[in-house]
Image (cartoon, rainbow, N blue to C red):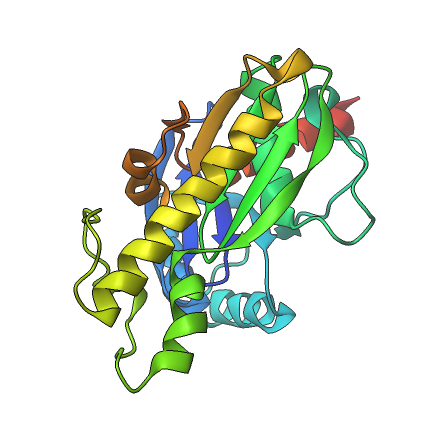
Amino acid sequence: MSDIALVDIGSTRVKWQVRSVEGGVLGSGANREPSGCARALASMVREAPIGAIWLSRVGPCEREEAFAKALAAVGVNAPVHAVTVTSDGPNGLHIDYAPGQLGVDRYCALAAARARCTAPVILVDAGTGVTVDVLDANGCHAGGYLLPGRQLGWEALQARLADRIAPREATQWPDDLETSPGLNSTEALERGWGLGLAAALDGLVARLRTGDRADAACWLTGGDAYWLAPLMREEARIVPNLVLDGLWELSRWDATACAG
């Protein structure tokens, strides 16, 4: 078997890894556009062939189409397996979410969590949007919550206060959030929304940690996980690359099914 590429086309960035047959990470990166990912994979192909590309895509289908065109342009001919959400997944994962409503990235993260853990898990993926998904010990997805992410929340209110707060790119947030009250509107919005988002997550996690989920682990993943973790009071740990790990699990599950 050849190496495989795992590609997560998110709302803002394209994250990727190339893994060996044994699962070792041979290369990884992140790009703003699908074309950048395609060029990176082309450079990996020069070292060793890639047998397949496993893809998770959220947002407009045009981004997936752009990725396919970019692959062809740089001469990467590996077949692309675009993951779709199914009611049953690897390791006993079961999904009851409304058909067509669960994001593929959430499905991949759930598959990764189920492969690692047979206890209840609360998954928080902090990206453009923040998703909270509940995975019970029996492998059933018990549903979840959706919130605007750090940048989306900022943009929603900044646009209404444009006379006193300037626009901000996602890269312009401070590494560490000051928690004292702001002395101008920019500080007040930055700190209010950051702390408010963390408090909302604390409240959801605390509400979920009852009954059979009293000891549920909370895993943080996504681009803003490292920023949010210090602001949360509920116990949580950062588990990076859950979507890519889930793509890997799904590729192994598919290979096993085909072999059977």
Q: Whole-percent x and y of residue 137?
A: 67, 15
Nearer-the-camera pick, 49 or 202: 202
Please give the name of the residue rendered at 43% of the width and 38% of the height, measured from the top-left corner: 221
Location of residue 190 by image quarter: bottom left
Q: Is residue 86 above or below residue 163?
A: above
Please give the name of the residue rendered at 59% of the width and 56% of the height, measured from the top-left corner: 57
Quarter holding the N terminus is top right
Quarter holding the C terminus is top right
Q: Whole-percent x and y of residue 170?
A: 31, 64
User: Total marks drawn?
Assistant: 0
Q: Is residue 46 above or below residue 250?
A: below
Q: Residue furthest bottom?
A: 163
Please give the name of the residue rendered at 65% of the width and 52% of the height, measured from the top-left corner: 82
Side of 204 relative to 224 (left or right): right
Q: Looking at the image, can residue 65 be seen?
A: yes
Q: Looking at the image, can residue 4 be seen?
A: no
Side of 154 relative to 143 (left or right): left
Location of residue 149 by image quarter: bottom left
Q: Is residue 165 above or below residue 210?
A: below
Q: Whole-percent x and y of residue 11?
A: 50, 62
Please give the name of the residue rendered at 46% of the width and 58% of the height, measured from the top-left corner: 128
Q: Whole-percent x and y of residue 203?
A: 51, 35
Nearer-the-camera pick, 207 or 68: 207
